[in-house]
Amino acid sequence: MHLIEKTEARIDRFDARLLEGLAGEKNTLALLQTLPGVDLIGAAMQLVEIDTDMVDFCSADRLAFWVGICPGNNGLL
């Protein structure tokens, strides 16, 4: 097996384990996928990074800025 194929297989295994661990979060994953450009794996990565308790962000604008989907980042820091 070539290096690229091995790497792709490892990524596929990682993705499967990630989704297994988030099996109870199907609704949250579906909701995150409504964001433009966010697929299932992107939603899963965002969920494990920010969790479901978003109180630390104080507002939706700050969360969008932190995730990198905010079109204007002025004054949010």
Image (cartoon, helix red, strand yellow):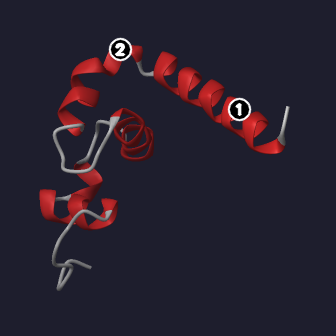
Q: CA distance from mark 1 to mark 2?
A: 23 Å
Q: 19 left or right of 2?
A: left
Quadrant of residue 47 within the rendered picture: top left
**Amino acid type for the residue under numbered disc 1:** Arg
Q: Residue at x 18, y 85 (%)?
A: 74
Disc marking residue 10: 1
Q: Is residue 7 placed above or below 19 in the rendered structure?
A: below
Residue 69 at x, y percent in the picture: 24, 62
**As drawn, which residue projects farthest toward the front?**
2
Of labels 1 and 2, earlier in sequence is 1
The x and y percentages for residue 50 are 37, 46
Can you see residue 59? Answer: no
Q: How many marks?
A: 2
Q: Is residue 60 shown left or right of residue 8?
A: left
Image coordinates of residue 49 in percent, x first then y, are 44, 46
Disc 2, SS: helix
Rendered residue at 31%/65% (across/down): 68
> Is 41 left, or right, of 26 in this rendering?
right
Residue 34 visible, this angle: yes
Q: Residues within 10 Å of mark 2 (few under 14, many from 20)?
A: few
Q: Position of residue 46 (x, y in %)?
A: 38, 45
Which residue in the protein does label 2 denote?
24
Give the residue type that dot 2 points to. Answer: Gly
Split into 4 quadrants, where in the image is the N terminus? top right
Mark 1: few, some, or many residues within 10 Å (few <14, many ≥20)?
few
Residue 50: image tag = none
- Quarter of the figure that contains the C terminus: bottom left
Foreground mark, 1 or 2, reads 1
Residue 61 vertical position relative to residue 42 in the rendered view, above or below: below
> Which corner quadrant of the image does residue 5 belong to?
top right
- Residue drawn 67% across and 36% down? 8
